[in-house]
Amino acid sequence: MLIIGKMDIKEAAKQVAVLRAQIEENNRRYYVDNAPVISDYDYDQLLYRLADLERQFPELDSPDSPTHHVGSDLQAGLRFARKEHKYPMLSLGNTYSIEEIEEFAARAARLINTSFTYSLELKFDGAGISLTYRHGRLVQALTRGDGVVGDDVTVNIRKIAGIPHSLKGSGYPDDFEIRGEILMPFDSFDRLNQEREDAGDEPFANPRNAASGSLKLLDSEEVGRRGLMCTLYHIPSQDIPGFEGHYQALDAAASWGLPVSDKRRLCSSIEDIKEYINYWDSERKRLPYATDGVVIKINSLDLQQELGYTAKSPRWAVAYKFKAEEALTRVLSIDYQVGRTGAVTPVANMEPVFLSGTMVKRATLVNEDFIRSFDLHIGDTVKVVKGGEIIPKIIGVDLSARPADATLPVFPSVCPDCGTPLVKEEAQARWYCPNATACPTQIKGRLLHFLSRKAMNVLCGEATIDQLYDRGFVRRPSDFYQLQMRQLMSLEGWKEKASTRFLESIEASKKVTFDHVLFALGIRYVGQTTAAMLAARFGSIDALAAATYEQLLEVEDIGATMARSIYDYFRNEAETAEIERLKAAGLQFSMKEQAAAKASNALEGMTVVVSGTFALSRDEMKALVAAHGGKTASGVSGKTSFLLAGEKPGPEKVKKAEDLGVRIMSEAEFMALIGPEKTENVTKEEEDFPQDLFGGMI
């Protein structure tokens, strides 16, 4: 238990609120945004701290606390049918020392008071999956989802080599589930990232993210092409009566043709467990796929049922996490990169070192404050880590190894690309180049963003942007729509076929919907989800441009900084002139045609506040409101048409609605209002790359 010391409940409540916000934010970054920013270990420390506070101050505990539920990979947008798991898919508790494993074994022994053995397996770093076989045939594959409900990705799973459509042999149950992970081997990961970089797309941070993202693709043929693999490791005991142990059940599954790992081992003592952990801590580096620990399970299925579960994890299993791989290497130089928003990021160039399955040569230094915090010098020997296979970062400097000629880096005072003096906004840690209209790197970055897959979806990479920019053919997005065949044919390496494909791709981009066009504009702080929300809320670029700062603040999830950025963007003459040029080129700047094809006017002119839990996600309920002509707001006011209240709505919102006489509408009443036939194909969100932060599924 962590030592909190003397603390009153008021201070404890503040800390609980902060911790819950941090944990939920990191859940979102991990499961939904596919952009984790902390290691599994650091995340677990936040969770342990919160659990400790809730134990010491029980009155602060809540069923909604992240200590009582697992993260969710479900996101707005009905890309796949959602189905309930036969049994919940829970997460494993993580441990980081042999002492914690010993505590786990001691607790189990006290509860069951008999001898038992352990089944040990590698903890694979992929995307959780649950397969259902009925009469020997694969009938369903569900993602982990929120542990209770998952996405039905059966059509994609059928394209992954090694997963049998029909079982062989005999003796398998008529109807059973088997669970495991979808993995992307290192070779497939390297090939995919090279393809993405060539196409100008952002590479995946690690094989786990790539596997998860691939599993949610709408093109099943592309899923099959990505070189995924599967390993299975758990059959719920309820589905395999007659089997004595977990290990024996997996042996049987292997005989039926299912892809079960051959790296398993039965152990009878802590010494056996230590030996297995120590062996694989070293040997895992030779494996062709990512692993990050060992799973220890009590083998007896009867004892598993006797021990049962907590709200989040089984009492009969635990995960031991390998220490994040570290390596020592030397900093050779520091580059200062300018992004499309003008932010200047220092990047360390290092002597190449092999780390977590890849050769590492560069590591971000985040900002000037980060460099100063380590007193980092060029020539220093540094400790580099890839905790949880996240992008490499420097976590320490070996000052004893500092050479005499090591030099202190000097953060530039001017843009390394265009020479414009850098600025730092109040409360910001980063320096920025304010020369957005003439800084070559910023211009090329915005051009590349404009054409990217999630924006205008044009076949283009960095090399093409460099060529077009260097020849003076493009300086702003509207220039792409003026390109001629003769210009492209004059570029080095370009032939008629490539030029034709590029122009066809540009022409096809004119049909891209308004929400993607809005994202493509590159308004600072406006990501793809925000762009979709703004497009649904305002309906057209003209309505958005005319919105006041106060009206922008009324949009849920848009704060003061983002609202100011959007407001200022549409008061910049250069930006509005570019929008007019893009309009003239034929791009879509209105949702009217799209909305007419898939929605009604049932909520026209209404402002709706959504609160509570629904059959759909809250984002999907908001999308339904927008699709049927309404607007959503974050707070109840006199202008609110009704409060759409699901299960456990916010009590403050309910009270305010009652005080103001605002109607409180149930989910059933809402669905009846818009009509059940009108709820199909409401929204289509961007790809999400769900992960299991706890590293394993049951």
Image: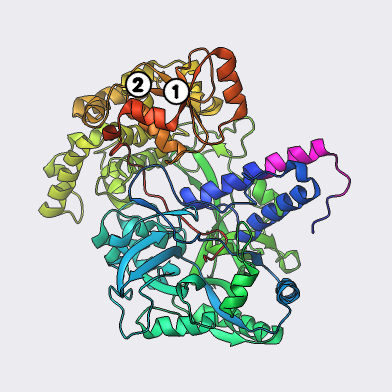
Instruction: Name the kind of residue labelled 2 in the image.
Output: Leu
Instruction: Name the quarter where the N terminus is drawn.
Output: bottom right
18 within the magenta span: yes
Q: Position of residue 94 (x, y in %)?
A: 64, 65
| Percent of width and height locating residue 445 | 39, 42
User: Does the magenta segment cover residue 680?
Assistant: no
Give the overall secondary structure of the magenta segment: helix
Q: Which residue is mark 1?
A: 608
Name the residue located 61 percent from the left edge and 35 percent from the top edge: 428
- Percent coordinates x, y for residue 64 in the rendering: 61, 44
Tell me whether the residue at label 2 lies in contact with that at label 1, contact meaning CB atoms closer than 8 angstroms. yes
Near mark 1 (Cα within 10 A), the count class, few <14, some 14-19 or many ≥20, is many
| Disc 2 target residue | 603
Seen in the picture, residue 596 relative to 115 is either above or below; the reply is: above
Residue 534 in sight in this render: no
Which x, y percent locates residue 288?
Answer: 44, 77
Residue shown at 50% from the left, 56% from the top: 147
- What's the magenta region? 5-19
Q: Is residue 400 left or right of residue 195?
A: right
Amino acid at circle 1: Val
Point out the residue furthest to the front here: 242
Q: Earlier in the sequence, mark 2 or mark 1?
A: 2
